[in-house]
Image: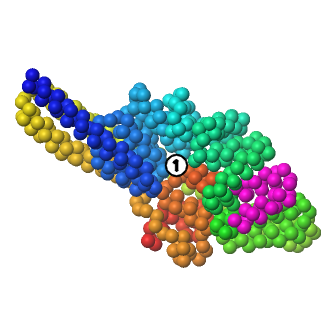
């Protein structure tokens, strides 16, 4: 009887200790969400005490989900998927529906960056299935994201009707649950979906909603793009007066916020509108301004675009000599761009080959890591068996438990050190960069002969955190070609040839 009371006391003490540990772990996970830089978030999570040894599977799964997300944002997709699979194994068949939905959404996003469209679609649908009939605000927010992501995949597959169907379903959830933080993206997705189908009036309606939200929040970072999207719809509808008005608005805002690519592009758009109106003199003036601005800011694709309209307008206004000169320059610039694109394609092929070689070594390191974790798990099971089988008096039992915990702590530290060594080697294989981006735009431009724009600076910061071109495009609401153009401009202005040299350039100027 005395032994039963002793065992009960130990169980209650263990439960109390476990609850305290769980609360501390939850607090650490919430604190991790506040760390903006993905590399710093990885460091924080790996160093957070107790998160790996906590007994609560849902907390441990949430830990691996957040760690996987952080690695994905740091362009370490294979490592990200590895951690996300660990999270999925921990929740298993348990009723953690919202957590499993978040894990599947993260796995879909990561697969999409690896161009595994089918895998991404499978994960997004699995996330929706897990949510089922959940009616919480958190579940609704996740559901709207999943539906929007599926719509995005259908848009890439050029199945525009399906894309619109999922965009509408996503927005219906946003409206039903009044998800204020999702309205901007809901309207934006619908605007793109309708535009792809040629539903210009509906696209205009949602673009105007996006503009209202931007103006209401006082955020000017996307205002130029909103004006330009609206102008392009008027352009397609051949409403030249309204198109010109919104292109001018976009140009003025882009200049104010140093969105030089949009600024230069608007001159070409205005030149084209003037050409359609038969205002050749006005169009030539816009094209000339676009050419000068493109030269000033080193925007080769926009330079080509502007000079194309310049040539067309000169030809239509019978300025033959100038038109021929413009055409020669146009062909020379196109040839230059072709050479740059060829070099970029060669670099991409080389990068894929290097990645394939790295993956062979990574597979071996991952296997070694799994063996180490298996050994840690086996030794922990032996400890639990010894404690459970103990029949000694309470004092001796407590001493044994204390002794075993000390030994376990030492083993854990040794094994954790091995795991950290493998993580470091994995990071080296994946080509990760250490450090933080701490060079301001003003400091950087002081050292450059040709200044970079604020938008190029935003892209530069994301390059430093190793985001993919597609991730940069999604976050900044740009097309993938626009991101590539920004990168080419950055390489020229910084005097480098690839992303690795960009990071070395910035690191050398701290």
In the image, residue 506 above or below residue 462: below
> Is 131 left or right of 374, judged from the image as shown?
right
Q: What residue appears at the point 68 percent right and 68 percent down from the top-left corner?
A: 255
> Is residue 493 found inside the magenta-colored segment of the image?
no
Horizontal and vertical percent position of residue 165 = 68, 34
Q: What residue appears at the point 63 percent right and 39 percent down from the top-left corner?
A: 175
In this rendering, does residue 149 appear at all?
Answer: no
Which residue occupies the foreground of this view, 394 or 157?
Answer: 394
Q: What residue appears at the point 32 percent right and 51 percent down from the top-left corner?
A: 47
Which stretch appears magenta? Answer: 226-253
Quarter holding residue 17: top left
> Is 240 left or right of 437, judged from the image as shown?
right
Horizontal and vertical percent position of residue 40 = 40, 56
Which residue occupies the foreground of this view, 345 or 89?
Answer: 89
> Is residue 237 found inside the magenta-colored segment of the image?
yes
Q: Where does the C terminus fall, quadrant-wise?
A: bottom left
To which residue does mark 1 refer?
Answer: 352
Which residue occupies the foreground of this view, 192 or 505?
Answer: 192
Which residue occupies the foreground of this view, 257 or 309?
Answer: 257
Quarter holding residue 226: bottom right
Could you say whether the residue bearing mark 1 is in a helix, strand or loop?
helix
Q: Residues within 10 Å of mark 1 (few under 14, many from 20)?
A: few
């Amino acid at each position: 009887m005395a032994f039963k009371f002793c065992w009960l006391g130990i169980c209650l003490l263990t439960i109390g200790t476990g609850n305290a540990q769980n609360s501390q772990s939850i607090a650490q996970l919430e604190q991790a969400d506040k760390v903006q830089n993905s590399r710093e978030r990885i460091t924080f999570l790996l160093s957070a005490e107790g998160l790996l040894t906590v007994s609560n599977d849902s907390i441990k799964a949430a830990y691996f989900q957040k760690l996987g997300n952080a690695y994905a944002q740091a362009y370490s997709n294979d490592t990200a998927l590895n951690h996300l699979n660990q999270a999925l194994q921990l929740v298993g068949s348990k009723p953690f529906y919202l957590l499993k939905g978040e894990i599947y959404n993260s796995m879909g996003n990561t697969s999409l960056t690896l161009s595994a469209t089918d895998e991404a679609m499978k994960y997004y649908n699995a996330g929706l299935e897990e949510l089922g009939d959940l009616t919480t605000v958190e579940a609704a927010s996740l559901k709207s994201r999943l539906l929007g992501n599926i719509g995005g995949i259908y848009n890439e597959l050029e199945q525009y009707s399906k894309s619109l169907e999922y965009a509408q379903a996503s927005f219906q959830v946003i409206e039903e649950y009044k998800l204020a933080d999702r309205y901007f993206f809901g309207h934006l997705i619908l605007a793109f979906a309708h535009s792809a189908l040629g539903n210009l009036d509906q696209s205009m309606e949602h673009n105007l909603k996006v503009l209202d939200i931007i103006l209401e929040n006082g955020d000017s970072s996307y205002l130029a793009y909103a004006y330009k999207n609206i102008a392009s719809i008027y352009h397609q509808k051949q409403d030249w007066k309204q198109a010109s008005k919104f292109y001018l608005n976009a140009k003025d805002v882009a200049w104010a916020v140093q969105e030089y690519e949009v600024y230069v592009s608007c001159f070409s758009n205005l030149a084209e509108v003037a050409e359609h109106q038969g205002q050749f003199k006005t169009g030539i003036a816009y094209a000339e301004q676009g050419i000068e601005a493109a030269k000033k800011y080193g925007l080769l694709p926009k330079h080509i675009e502007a000079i194309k309209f310049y040539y067309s307008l000169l030809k239509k206004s019978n300025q033959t000599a100038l038109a021929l000169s413009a055409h020669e320059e146009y062909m020379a610039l196109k040839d230059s761009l072709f050479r740059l694109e060829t070099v970029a394609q060669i670099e991409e092929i080389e990068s894929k080959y290097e990645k394939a070689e790295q993956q062979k070594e990574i597979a071996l390191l991952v296997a070694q890591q799994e063996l180490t974790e298996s050994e840690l798990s086996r030794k922990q099971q032996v400890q639990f068996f010894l404690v459970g089988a103990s029949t000694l008096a309470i004092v001796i039992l407590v001493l044994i438990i204390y002794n075993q915990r000390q030994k376990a702590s030492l083993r854990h530290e040794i094994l954790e050190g091995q795991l950290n060594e493998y993580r470091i080697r994995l990071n080296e294989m994946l080509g990760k960069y250490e450090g933080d981006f701490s060079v301001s735009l003003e400091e950087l431009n002081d050292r450059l002969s040709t200044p970079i724009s604020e938008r190029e600076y935003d892209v530069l910061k994301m390059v430093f955190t190793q985001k993919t071109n597609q991730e940069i495009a999604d976050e900044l609401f740009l097309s993938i070609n626009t991101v590539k153009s920004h990168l080419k401009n950055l390489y020229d202005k910084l005097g480098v040839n690839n992303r690795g040299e960009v990071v070395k350039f910035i690191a050398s100027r701290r």
